[in-house]
Image: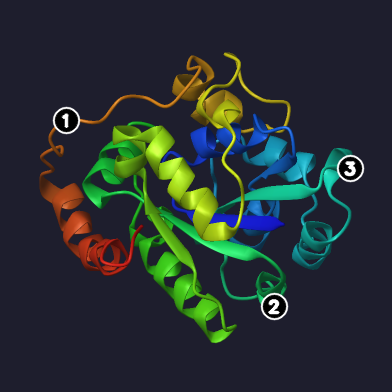
Amino acid sequence: MRIAMWSGPRNLSTAMMYSFASRSDFAVVDEPFYAAYLRMTGLGHPMRDQILASQSQDPEEVARALLGSVPAGKPHFYQKHMTQHMVPGMPRDWMAEVANVFLIRHPARVIASFGAKWDGFGLDDIGFTQQNELFDYSRTLGQNPVVIDSADIRRDPEGMLKRLCTAVGLDFEPAMLRWPEGGNPADGVWAAHWYGAVHGSTGFAPAEGDLPVLEGEAAELLEQALSHYERLAALKL
């Protein structure tokens, strides 16, 4: 089995990758289209040069690798993807060969968290519109894609991971609930900038409190993103 997990940034996506990496039967890959996305858009992300040097910048080559031999000879392959990376010109036909799962998070939390790491971002950078587009595309492939909310995972990691495994036809492994502190060998080179909190963890963080209160441009961005989140939230596990 190959699972493509689609989320925007700051969305529990790295913890989910660590969770699947803790299984005995999964290899994982971290944002394989990131370098191609930076080359195609010219965006000045943190660590841009290091990212471009660390991965293939050819999106077609990346897509072939996602359907090729699974690393380390494992039977299953978990692929962590950022929805905002799938700009026009990125191949999508390969999605027909994987189980597409959509990991969502309330945009107020995403905006507050992302803003602490990077200034001057907009709706295209946080992936909510692209997540809906990819969800719709996976439906055109005849799939019934799974949607799971990061808040539900944090409230009940074992229960929600069991439900996710059932939905994609896997047995749950208790090992998914824990991982070693300090990161994973599959981490992208950008981990040094983005993954500080999860590198200090050994399991899922507890449930979050009240939604952050946003003001000004952040509040306007929340208004733009909220309907996209709510649409998928209505379909979640």
Q: Secondary structure at mark 1?
A: loop
Q: Please tell me which of labels 3 and 2 falls first in the chain.
A: 3
Q: Position of residue 75 (x, y in %)?
A: 81, 48
- Residue 24: quadrant of the picture: top right
Q: Residue 224 or 107: which is nearer the viewer? A: 107
Disc 2 to disc 1, how far (Cα)?
39 Å
202 relative to 37 in the view: left or right:
left
Residue located 12% across and 48% down the image: 216
Q: Which of the labelled discs sits on residue 209, or is there none?
A: 1
205 vs 106: above or below: above
Disc 3 to disc 1, how far (Cα)?
41 Å
State how many labels appear: 3
Residue type highlighted by circle 1: Gly
* Quarter of the image where the C terminus is located: bottom left
171 relative to 236 in the view: left or right:
right
Comparing marks 3 and 1, which lies closer to the viewer?
3
Q: Position of residue 106 (x, y in %)?
A: 26, 50
